[in-house]
Image (tube, rainbow, N blue to C red):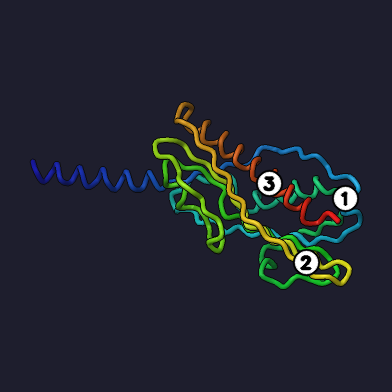
């Protein structure tokens, strides 16, 4: 009897650990930005997005990495319609920036939801420059994080700007996965608003 009880406790512990480390990823809802008309007119911009998240094997992923990258790139293109934005392949992220143009490098350090503090498992490395703070236990937590580097090499100048963005949204488990999906989209919108404002302020003459 004692052996059976011990086995059940052990099995329950394994189940709990595997369940608690499950991360959830859903595709973003369409976000309609306010276009910056005539801002960065005819400026050539190289944009490269790198997905640096660390997702567990048992994660529930309903939106692949390339779709997330493309959605973010489309949002930036829609925000700056007067600029000539070239989306580079992900493997160009670590390449040196070219002269006489603007290069925007974005590393996605987080875009996922999880129950409790295990949401921090999926956060990629952002060089230790950002403190994520405390994730509430007993709630759904969703986070979106970026590490942004902007190289403004126009007019034979070399101006560099960098910023870490991390947005966390938490809610009680009132609607199950629907709650998690909604707050993940909320964190995404908040992070994008800060990202776009950072681009504005960095490149405004």
Residue at the image point whose x is 57% and y is 33% from the top: 182
- Circle 2 packing at 10 Å, graded few (<14), some (14-19), many (20+), is few
Residue 166, image x and y in percent?
Answer: 58, 49
Residue receiving disc 2 = 159
Tag 3–tag 2 contact (CB < 8 Å): no
Q: Is residue 37 left or right of residue 34?
A: right
User: Which numbered disc flags the more N-terminal residue, 2 or 1?
Assistant: 1
User: Which numbered disc flags the more N-terminal residue, 1 or 3?
Assistant: 1
Residue at the image point whose x is 89% and y is 50% from the top: 82
Q: Is residue 94 left or right of residue 169?
A: right
Asked which secondary structure carries label 2, the reply is strand
Residue at the image point whose x is 49% and y is 40% from the top: 141
Count of marks overlaid on the render = 3
Of residues 65 and 45, the one nearer the viewer is 45
State whether residue 6 is above or below residue 124: above
Q: Nearer the viewer, mark 2 or mark 1?
A: 2
User: Which numbered disc flags the more N-terminal residue, 3 or 2?
Assistant: 2
Residue 1, image x and y in percent?
Answer: 8, 41
Residue receiving disc 3 = 194
Residue receiving disc 1 = 39
Residue 183, image x and y in percent?
Answer: 56, 36
Asked which secondary structure carries label 3, the reply is helix
C-alpha gap between disc 2 and disc 1: 18 Å
Residue at the image point whose x is 62% and y is 51% from the top: 165
Quadrant of image for the C terminus = bottom right
- Circle 3 packing at 10 Å, graded few (<14), some (14-19), many (20+), is some
Q: Is residue 128 left or right of residue 118?
A: right
Question: Which of the numbered marks, if any, corresponds to residue 112?
Answer: none
């Amino acid at each position: 009897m004692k052996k059976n009880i011990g086995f059940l406790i052990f099995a329950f512990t394994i189940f709990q650990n595997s369940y608690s480390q499950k991360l959830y990823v859903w595709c973003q809802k369409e976000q309609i930005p306010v276009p910056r008309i005539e801002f960065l007119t005819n400026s050539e911009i190289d944009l490269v997005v790198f997905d640096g998240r660390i997702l567990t094997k048992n994660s529930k992923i309903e939106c692949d990495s390339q779709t997330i990258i493309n959605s973010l790139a489309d949002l930036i293109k829609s925000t700056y319609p007067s600029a000539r934005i070239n989306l580079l392949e992900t493997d160009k992220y670590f390449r040196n920036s070219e002269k006489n143009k603007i290069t925007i490098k974005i590393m996605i350090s987080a875009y996922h939801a999880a129950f409790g503090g295990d949401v921090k498992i999926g956060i990629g490395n952002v060089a230790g420059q950002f403190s994520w703070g405390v994730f509430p236990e007993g709630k759904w937590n969703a986070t979106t994080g970026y590490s942004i580097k902007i190289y403004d090499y126009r007019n034979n100048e070399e101006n560099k700007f960098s910023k870490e963005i991390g947005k966390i949204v938490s809610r009680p488990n009132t609607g199950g996965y629907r709650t998690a999906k909604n707050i993940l989209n909320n964190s995404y919108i908040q992070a994008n608003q800060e990202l776009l404002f950072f681009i504005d302020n960095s490149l405004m003459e």
